[in-house]
């Protein structure tokens, strides 16, 4: 069984190039804030490559700024539905191919995006039990689910709003962009006072905000 890996990295100049045996995909998305919770811990469960299966993928998030790494087991179908960026990279002709993704990203922002997707799926299906992703840890040749918490629906915060906007545009999360624009209009004065380089915001997004 072939392993296919993708490296999604922070860069001012996003580009795609081929590396054997992996693909390297440059990207961006940074923030300094975090979200914490401490209740409703879930039990450990060992996951092996065999039971991860072709319907799921492991995403390794590497955050150099915070010197942190975190791994997520995600439903491939739901990931492709909400993060359109991955469509051209993860629609493999071999349905049994293992897919490995390494993401150089702010770990808090990336997990916020995963949590957003999960709660959108729950809202769409009217089912609060839908689980899109698990936090996992390496365990020999496989993975096990990490002790985690029951996840609350994420909310916009002024301090992380620009990072979420930039990340959602790059990952092609159109629904999230539309929701962010509504939030920006309601909190525009506070957001514009943030000490953030607004040049990261693309001209396309600027036009959407104006109109």
Image (tube, grey):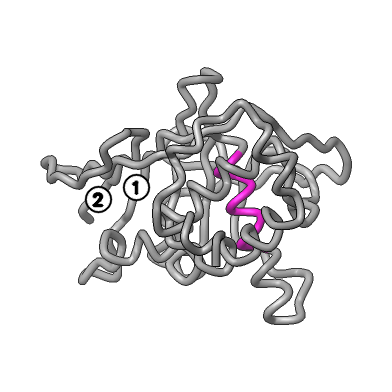
- x 57%, y 46%: residue: 164
Question: Quick check: 102 left or right of 188?
Answer: left
Q: Which residues are magenta?
A: 109-118
- Residue 193: horizontal and vertical position, in percent? 68, 33
Residue beneath label 1, please? 100
Q: Most prominent secondary structure in the magenta stretch? A: helix
Q: Which mark is residue 4?
A: 2
- x 69%, y 69%: residue: 130
Quadrant for the N terminus, please: bottom left
Question: Quick check: 37 left or right of 107?
Answer: right
Q: Which mark is residue 169?
A: none
Question: Image quarter for residue 98?
Answer: bottom left
Residue 144 visible in the displayed image:
no
Above/below status of 93 relative to 183? below
Quadrant for the C terminus, please: bottom right
Residue 181 visible in the displayed image:
yes
Question: Quick check: 107 left or right of 87?
Answer: right
Kindly check if marks 2 and 1 are in contact, taking CB atoms under 8 A apart as contact.
yes
């Amino acid at each position: 069984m072939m392993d296919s890996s993708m490296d999604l990295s922070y860069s001012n100049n996003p580009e795609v190039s081929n590396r054997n045996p992996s693909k390297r995909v440059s990207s961006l998305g940074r923030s300094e804030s975090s979200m914490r919770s401490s209740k409703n811990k879930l039990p450990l469960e060992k996951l092996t490559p065999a039971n991860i299966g072709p319907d799921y993928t492991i995403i390794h998030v590497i955050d150099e700024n915070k010197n942190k790494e975190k791994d997520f087991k995600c439903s491939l179908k739901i990931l492709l539905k909400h993060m359109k960026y991955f469509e051209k990279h993860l629609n493999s002709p071999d349905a049994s191919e293992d897919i490995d993704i390494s993401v150089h990203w702010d770990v808090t922002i990336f997990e916020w995006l995963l949590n957003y997707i999960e709660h959108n799926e729950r809202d769409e299906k009217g089912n609060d039990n839908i689980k899109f992703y698990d936090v996992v840890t390496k365990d020999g040749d496989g993975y096990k689910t990490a002790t985690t918490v029951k996840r609350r629906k994420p909310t916009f915060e002024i301090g992380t709003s620009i990072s979420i906007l930039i990340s959602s545009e790059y990952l092609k999360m159109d629904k999230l962009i539309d929701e962010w624009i509504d939030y920006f209009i309601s909190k525009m004065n506070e957001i514009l006072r943030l000490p953030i380089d607004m040049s990261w915001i693309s001209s396309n997004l600027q036009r959407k905000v104006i109109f």
